[in-house]
Amino acid sequence: MSEVTTKPVVPPAKPEQPRHGVGDALRGWWSGLSRPVQWAVGVPAIIALALLPLFPPPFIDTPGTSFGGVMAQFAMYALIAIGLNVVVGQAGLLDLGYVGFYAVGAYTVGLLTSPNSPWNQTDGGWLGSKWAWLACVPLAVAVTAVSGLILGTPTLRLRGDYLAIVTLGFGEIVRLLADNLGDLTNGSLGLSGIAYPSVGVSEDKPNGYFSAGNVGDSESSNLLDRANAGVWWFWVGMVLVIMILLIVGNLERSRVGRAWVAIREDEDAAEIMGVPTFKFKLWAFMIGAAVGGLSGALYAGQVQFINPTGFNIINSVLFLCAVVIGGQGNKLGVIVGAFVIVYLPNRLLSVQAVGQSAVGWVALIFTIALVVGLIVMWRRWARDQERPIRLGYLAGGAVAVIVMLVVLNNVLVFQKPGAQSLGDYKYLFFGITLMVVMIFKPQGLFPVRQKLLAYGRQVYQAVRRPSGDDAIGGTR
């Protein structure tokens, strides 16, 4: 008689729950919606964002500074962050001179449309029509893409710090050329009278909606009359950001995007596996340069004046800060980083630093402690809970922060003429923020989702899971 051996019942191992971030929670909620619901939520959200500069809530308004102008600057920085994210976040190339491409795009528009330019000295300007700016935008994109090709071809065989030093030198070379080639660029005096879209010209607005002189009429019931020049440029920037997001998103999902990820993670391994790394790095450099040139063209049309001081190394570092703080490789994350870089200094410019009331300091410290506490609680408890609890925690935290912002708006002492403001310490705040992010969140506030890693973990857990016979026992 054969001996029957019964295996002990082994309960299946509970797979380890993945740790969720805020971006994962929001992404999971969004992906759980049906396509009609996504449209029903997304379209009103975009419309609300477009109308935000016209009706800014008091707790996010920027007293003393046009909120529409701040949002226009945010749209420009968002474009810059998306382009730099292609180079740094997706392809893993450290670029410290991205401001050079930004300057090339701006000067392309300026040289072709400014009356101070030697290239535009014909009667009325050979690009003096009302569509001159729009005609120059694709030229600026093409010129900066070619400049990326020229810079990248000899330098992209370098890696790490060596590539960073070369790109840093490129940014400074562009600025110094703009400053010293006075016969071409008008030197430090800059180029003024740069073209912009001449739309909405009327007796009340002789220069149109996009002119820097359009301050808007906040009392008007007509939305078009309420919008100042900054709001109009913000709307144009939103359209460009959405277009670039669609293009970059499609690239991410293509073989180009997969090659970028392989290069970023391990360039040697990618080369061994047959990925033509130099070609794809050059692609990333040219695409990033083109987006930088687009943002430069947007900047030139918006301010209608450019000079070399606006393209220094500090701006290049701020661009990189937006990518690092938001999350390298995450398109929406770097947009959040761009908003932080633009909005916080303009908001703090209205808050008086010296002579602030005790209640104001207490409320400000409590708000900072609240934000830090919410982040710590999220990392230690909330992100490991079920999705309804995670979403409820995020909603409750957002409400609490908004309430404290309303309180701050009512208790802080705002800046008087000539007084020192908290905005004067913006570089200190950004430095502290970078240190905190590097210590506690080195991948940024919204780190990129590692799809392949997550998929591999699921397959591994499925393979390791005991089979039905092993789980309930069997005979041998």
Image (cartoon, grey):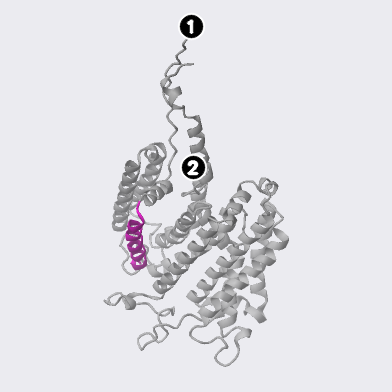
Q: Circle 2 sits on which residue?
A: 440
Could you tell me residue 208's position as x and y percent?
Answer: 41, 83
User: What is the three-letter code of the residue carrying label 2?
Assistant: Phe
In this rendered view, identify the residue nearer to me: 475 or 377: 475
Amino acid residing under circle 1: Met
Q: Residues within 10 Å of mark 1 (few under 14, many from 20)?
A: few
Q: Is residue 441 visible from the viewing direction of this image? A: yes
Question: Farthest residue in the front direction?
Answer: 1
**Does residue 93 sit above or below 225 in this rendering?**
above
Of helix, strand and loop, which mostly describes the magenta segment?
Answer: helix
Residue 56: x and y in percent read 32, 65
Q: Read off the magenta span.
A: 33-52
- Sequence-wise first label, 1 or 2: 1
Residue displayed at 67% across by 66% down: 149
289 displayed left or right of 57: right
Count every numbered label the image shows and give the total. 2
At numbered mark 2, what does the secondary structure look like: helix, strand or loop? helix
Residue 395 % position (x, y): 32, 48
Q: Which residue is mark 1?
A: 1
In reply to whether residue 42 is colored magenta, the answer given is: yes
Relative to residue 149, is residue 443 drawn left or right? left
